[in-house]
Amino acid sequence: MARISFLAGVGVGYVLGARAGRQRYEQIKTQASQLWSSPKVQRTVDQAKDTAKTQAPVVADKVTGAAKDAAGTVKDKAGSAHLPGRGEDLPDTIHRGDDGELHADTSGFGPGGDKLP
């Protein structure tokens, strides 16, 4: 009997909650629509659009400048890493030649050229 009463209570609570929830949802939806349609909000939206249009080139120039600066910094750091003895921590068996390429000292380790497949 207690179980049936509990289930009935859950069912009634669900139905009433769903109805109240839907009514509250519709109320919030109506209020949000009214707020969005108000002249004051629309004026503010229009001002924001105008500001975005006028400031877009300024922002684009700043972003472009920052990207170029960052690219230059990366290029400088990468360039210094290719110079022998600067910015690289290479094992003793590897060195960077005058051509800027990595070269390995193959003498003394590995199976040897005559033992390779």
Image (cartoon, rainbow, N blue to C red):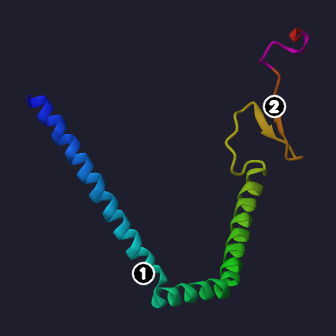
Q: Percent position (x, y) of residue 109? A: 77, 18
Q: Percent position (x, y) of residue 4? A: 14, 31
Residue type of the residue flagged with mark 1: Leu
Residue at (20, 45) in percent of width and height = 12
Front residue of 58/53: it is 53
Could you say which disc has been placed on residue 60 in the image?
Answer: none
Picture quadrant of residue 61: bottom right
* Magenta-tinted stretch: 108-114
Residue type of the residue flagged with mark 2: Ala
Residue at (71, 83) in percent of width and height = 57
Secondary structure at numbered mark 1: helix
Q: Percent position (x, y) of residue 95? A: 78, 38
Picture quadrant of residue 80: bottom right
Q: Is residue 31 magenta?
A: no
Q: Main secondary structure of the magenta part?
A: loop
Crowding at mark 1 (Cα within 10 Å: few <14, some 14-19, many 20+): few
Q: Is residue 113 magenta?
A: yes
Read off the residue under disc 2.
104
**The C terminus appears in which quarter of the rendering?**
top right
Which circle's residue, 2 or 1, is located before the other in the chain? 1
Front residue of 90/13: it is 13
